[in-house]
Image (cartoon, rainbow, N blue to C red):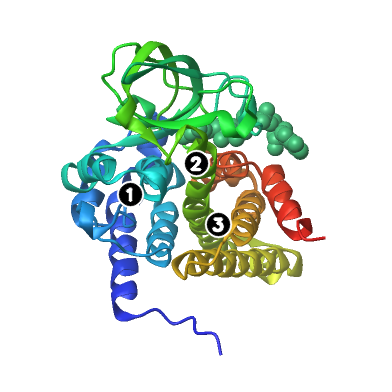
Amino acid sequence: MVGFELDEMQQMLRDLARDFALEEVRPNAEHWDQNSEYPSKAINTAHEMGILNLHIPEEYGGPGLGSIEEVLVNEELAWGDPGFATAAYATGLACAPIITGGTHSQKDKYLRMVSEKGALASYAVTEPGAGSDVAACQTQAVKDGDEYVINGSKMWITGAGKADWFFVLAKTDINAGYAGMSGFIVDADTPGLSLGKKENNMGQRCSDTRSLTFEDMRVPAENLCGGSESGGWMNAMKAFDMSRPNIAAHATGLSRAAYEHALRYSGERMTFGKPIHKHQAVQFMLADMKTKIEASRLLTWKSASEFDAGIRNTESAAHAKRFASDTAMEVTTDAVQIFGGYGYSEEYPVARLMRGAKVMQIYEGSSQVQKMIIGREITKDL
Ligand SMILES: Cc1cc2nc3c(=O)[nH]c(=O)nc-3n(C[C@H](O)[C@H](O)[C@H](O)COP(=O)(O)OP(=O)(O)OC[C@H]3O[C@@H](n4cnc5c(N)ncnc54)[C@H](O)[C@@H]3O)c2cc1C
């Protein structure tokens, strides 16, 4: 038998995150989105409550909890608001490659800054000319004594305007493909690093997304992360096995929020003399939403438990991320449909949720990239 019951600590953690989402996130979500306001205070409160960055080991001041605990919390945070969840998780994503491939002193410095001081961080891999095709990245790092000199630019970096440090992927060997890619930890105040303007995104507008430019930026060689110069790519990808279940959890929470709004409205709105959920066409939409949300959660939990059990979860994390984010787009679109004309208005939350869902099919590897990963995994032994 496979057990789905949560233990007492997991239930308490989920309830804590749910109460926080209800009391601190939901009441502010519309304001943050309409004003593109970064939710600094709420992120700080969540940090102080101990519900962020659960994956940081105890040795470095974190709670050292598992992926399952993280996905439980992240579903609730995105149920509160997907933009908040993305903004709050940016640091978690940046910490992942340090956890998987950092040295003891890197962990002691940079993970501890996050766990003990509430520092923020960003994961900077995408470039203006290289997103899905990471190997096409042009940023270069050239060794000069005990430093690397980095030149290039990054694009769409979540949390960049607020970050205290960055995880940056750059090429130390321009001709070596993936093996030429190296990971670096870069302090935000490093001379030569400059930030672009905050992007005017379709949704999740409270999350800060910017470009970065590196001009002769000098980074100490001790900040090379990933074991060796050639280890950067593999380590950055390993970090996705840790982070993708969390994006799937965000998508599940967002879907659940849209479904609950639609369900409630379907009992209030009358047409042709009855509540609209009495029309089978509407009821079937609600049934499809619920089935897909349940399936999203199960895939998310499976990939998280595999990660916790030390089982390679690359395929299961891709299933979860792709299915849950595609579901979020479908569920939020149907939620707007159930609200009819009111759904199209920003007066109701479902419009914000639908705008917020779209990027989940794009970032952390688009839905097409997840299919490429699944395809590669299922055919590799043929
Ligand atoms: C709001 C936001 C926040 C982000 N945050 C971060 C961040 O914090 N850090 C970071 O490094 N990046 C971040 N990104 C970047 C994100 O990961 C990339 O946008 C994503 O990987 C896609 O890359 P691209 O935009 O260059 O699209 P492209 O790679 O140009 O792809 C365009 C389209 O073609 C499809 N496609 C590409 N190649 C293939 C193929 N081989 N087969 C089939 N289809 C294909 C893609 O799925 C997509 O639909 C963020 C993006 C956004 C919008």
Q: Nearer the viewer, mark 2 or mark 1?
A: 2
Q: Nearer the viewer, mark 3 or mark 2?
A: 2
Q: Are marks 2 and 1 in contact (CB under 8 Å)?
A: no
Q: Identify which residue, 142 or 333, lies in the foreground.
A: 142
Question: Quick one: label 3 or label 2, which is nearer the N terminus?
Answer: 2
Vertical relation: 48 (above or below) 41: below
Which residue is label 2 attached to? Answer: 236
Which residue is label 1 attached to? Answer: 25
The answer to whether any part of residue 13 appears in the image is yes
User: Residue 134 falls in which quadrant of the image?
Assistant: top right
In this picture, residue 311 sits left or right of residue 132: left
> Which residue is located at x 65 percent, y 48 percent?
333
Which residue is label 3 attached to? Answer: 255
Q: For the residue marked with disc 1, what is the amino acid?
A: Val
Vertical relation: 46 (above or below) 358: below
Q: For the residue marked with disc 2, what is the amino acid?
A: Ala
Vertical relation: 214 (above or below) 307: above
The C terminus is located in which quarter?
bottom right
Q: Is mark 3 on a helix, strand or loop?
A: helix
Q: Identify which residue, 296 or 232, lies in the foreground.
A: 232
